[in-house]
Amino acid sequence: MAEKFDSVVVGGGPAGIAAAYTMAKAGLNVLVLEKGEKPGAKNMFGGVIFRHHTEKIVPEFWKTAPIERHVVEYQYWFMTKESHLLMSHRNQKFNKTYNAFTVHRAKFDPWFAKLAEDAGAIIINRTTVDGVIKENGRVVGVKTERGEVLADVVIAADGVNSMLSKQAGLRDEPPLDAMAIAVKEVIALPKQKIEERFNLGPEEGVAALLVGWGSGMHEGFMYTNRDTISLGVGISLKDLDESGQRPHILYEEFKNHPSIAPSARR
């Protein structure tokens, strides 16, 4: 017979782990199934986690979480192909009342997963969920290559393009203009250089949104980490399809923009 849990969470990203951690703390028997080697191994994002929402789940998480820097300045770049207009907001209050933090998911996700495990959740990695189990029209479990798992509640946290939700008949194929793909590069830069270049204190950081450059670009982003800079660009699948270009080519063009290249190369 298949093993039975109060809840099975499919996906070990922040959403899935947040659900597992919350339920485990409430005393429920929770299983998390993650297809990567560990939580965070298959995840990519720009690099910022906001305090307000995260501390509702883990109060004062920044005291133990592997954060890079706390954000004190937000920049907005309005770009053409050869220039940009920069607007920024810096608030020294963010040194006392934190607003957001830059992080690396490869470090943050395993830390978060450990909290869920310590609360009682079971996390099984390297496990792919192939579909749902239905009984009388109700989802009662999932199928994996390791076997079937039953649960009172199944939570699909397998990403924005959740295949599990589609198989369960809960969502249609999203339109191309509702989906985006991103390319990111993490550029090594000495800690002191970052702080000099962006006029930052030892633990302070900058988060930047760059818009308007090129044809079909959705948005660019730049975040300062402890001794690296996260630089990337996202584009809607519709714009990508219409442009006929490859994401990594668009990123190289973005990185070579006159306003970006000097900072990336020094």
Image (cartoon, helix red, strand yellow):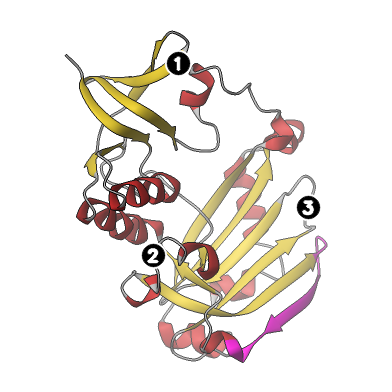
Residue 261 placement (x, y as % from top left): 63, 69
Q: Residues within 10 Å of mark 1 (few under 14, many from 20)?
A: few
First-in-chain label (1 vs 2): 2
Q: Nearer the viewer, residue 17 or 36?
A: 17
The answer to whether mark 1 and mark 2 are in CB contact below 8 A is no
Q: Nearer the viewer, residue 262 or 100?
A: 100
Res. 112 image quadrant: bottom left
The answer to whether mark 3 and mark 1 are in CB contact below 8 A is no
Label 1 residue SS: strand
The reply to whether the magenta stretch includes residue 86 is yes
The residue mark sitting in front, 3 or 1, is 1
Which residue has dot 2 on it? 58
The residue mark sitting in front, 1 or 2, is 1
Q: CA distance from mark 1 to mark 2?
A: 32 Å
Q: Which residue range is magenta in the image?
A: 79-93
Q: Residue at x 41, y 62 (%)?
A: 104
Residue 40 placement (x, y as % from top left): 36, 50
Q: CA distance from mark 2 to mark 3?
A: 40 Å
Look at label 2 and name its amino acid. Val
Residue 155 placement (x, y as % from top left): 42, 34
- Tag on residue 214? 3
First-in-chain label (3 vs 1): 1
Residue 175 placement (x, y as % from top left): 71, 28
Look at label 1 and name its amino acid. Arg
Q: Residue at x 56, y 71 (%)?
A: 264
Which residue has dot 1 on it? 138
Look at label 3 and name its amino acid. Gly
Q: Nearer the viewer, residue 154 or 26?
A: 26
